[in-house]
Amino acid sequence: MAISVTEILGTDSLSGSRLVINDNFNVLASEINAMEVYFAPAAGTITNLQNVSTEALRVGLSTILLDINASTFDILTNVKMTGNLSMSGGGIFRNDTNPTPLNDTTAGATMTIEVGSSTAIPPYTINRCGNTDITSDLDILLNNGSIGQEIFFICTEGSGNVVIQGVSGNMVTTGALDKITLNALGESVHLLAIDNGSGLPVWFIVGGDGYVLS
């Protein structure tokens, strides 16, 4: 709401306008005090608002964590939910695909590819894999994930064996050696990292097609 103050003209006496000047200051002070219920300049905070209407919102200074504008809604950091996510009329689209195929070409002479590491969880959800070398297995070593993390391995090329196995007993299957083999176009396996009961993640198979356990 706009505020108004009384104008003091050049022909007015300052001493005679003392009441007007004081009234103007009182109007301004009252409005500033009313705004400071919501704005705390020293703390750099805004609180107690009932409604905010804006064209864009950005959270973060040197590192942007949230960016909402007329064309995008980007969350650029981890999201932790403690409640339900309800969707109506929309869907979840997953496009976290490793841009580099896990195959005999990228593996090189060792025919071994490590996914994730001892200090970092596997970085991609969807991994294309394949092996055009029918004489040698391609070994994919799957490191620990984060509890609740999912990962897909999908065979997109070749007919040689792609053997997926865990590291340090972090994979649980019904196979004797906890090895998952893919060797034909379209075969896949879907793994989920769950708590082993001691707070450590282990991989369990929750879906897939055509894979073989050994």
Image: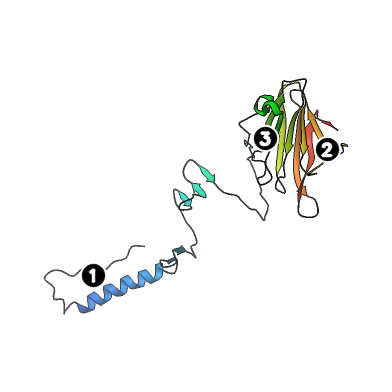
In the image, what residue occupies the spot 47% across and 50% down? 58
**Residue 8, placed above or below residue 120:** below
Q: Which mark is residue 6?
A: 1
**Residue 39, placed above or below residue 19:** above
Report, in whole angstroms, how far the alpha carbon at label 2 lies from the one at label 1.
Answer: 84 Å
Name the front one of labels 3 and 1: 3
| Residue 76 relative to residue 39: left or right | right
Element type where label 2 sits in the image: loop
Q: Which is nearer the N-term, disc 2 or disc 1?
A: 1
Neighbour class for label 2 at 10 Å: few (<14), some, many (≥20)? Answer: some
Looking at the image, which is closer to me, 205 or 22?
Answer: 205
Residue of label 3 = 126
Looking at the image, which is closer to me, 89 or 176?
Answer: 176
The amino acid type of the residue labelled 2 equals: Asp
Residue of label 2 = 178
Q: Position of residue 136 (x, y in %)?
A: 77, 23
Q: Position of residue 19 (x, y in %)?
A: 23, 79
The amino acid type of the residue labelled 1 equals: Thr
Q: Quadrant of the C terminus?
A: top right
Looking at the image, which is closer to me, 37 or 58?
Answer: 58
| Residue 138 relative to residue 88: left or right | right
